[in-house]
Image (cartoon, rainbow, N blue to C red):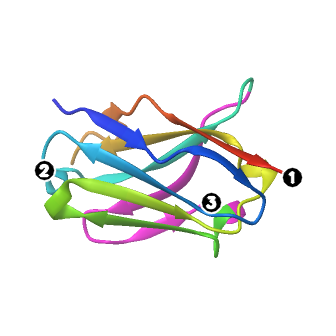
């Protein structure tokens, strides 16, 4: 079992930056991949960025060049650096992790709200 807890959300003006953190209750090297989804009310949860245990990253087209995902294995933490934020980035951001061989998301964090004002 593992718990994920996000932090770093908040209110920021368009063009600003935020860094989200997600701390896991166990070593993140045991995960196949970790990443971030986001969701706005009434819409599906969409993948924003992911990073595999091998360091391969993937980004949604809408955030490429603006967001960067990274990990700190010593702190069991995955980060999402968000720059040049836009109002369309407003959402609840969820951290996730999946285990090797399960081919599904095994753990979710409770989410953190990001609001970008015009």
- Residue at image coords 25%, 63%: 53
Secondary structure of the residue carrying numbered label 2: loop
Q: Which residue is disc 3 drawn over?
A: 60
Q: Which residues are magenta?
A: 43-62
Marks 3 & 1, CB-CB < 8 Å contact: no
Quadrant for the N terminus, please: top left
Indicate which label's residue lies in the foreground, 3 or 2: 2
x and y percentages locating residue 106 in the rendered image: 30, 34
Residue extending farthest to the right is 118
Instruction: Name the residue nearer the viewer: 8 or 53.
Output: 8
Along the polypeptide, which appears first: circle 3 or circle 2?
2
Indicate which label's residue lies in the foreground, 2 or 1: 1
Residue 116 relative to residue 114: left or right = right
Secondary structure of the residue carrying numbered label 1: loop
Indicate which label's residue lies in the foreground, 3 or 1: 1
Answer whether residue 2 is visible to the viewer in this image. Answer: yes
Residue 51 relative to residue 9: left or right = left
Q: Which residue is disc 1 drawn over?
A: 118
Cα–Cα gap, marks 3 and 2: 26 Å
Residue extending farthest to the bottom is 65
């Amino acid at each position: 079992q593992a718990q994920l807890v996000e932090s770093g959300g908040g209110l920021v003006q368009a063009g600003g930056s935020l860094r989200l953190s997600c701390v896991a209750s166990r070593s993140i090297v045991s995960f196949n991949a970790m990443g971030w989804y986001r969701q706005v009310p009434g819409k599906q949860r969409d993948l924003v960025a992911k990073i595999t245990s091998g360091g391969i990253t993937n980004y949604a087209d809408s955030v490429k060049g603006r967001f960067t995902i990274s990990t700190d294995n010593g702190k069991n933490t995955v980060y999402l650096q968000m720059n040049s934020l836009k109002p369309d980035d407003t959402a609840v951001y969820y951290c996730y992790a999946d285990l090797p061989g399960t081919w599904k998301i095994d753990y979710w964090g409770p989410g953190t709200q990001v609001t970008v004002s015009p």
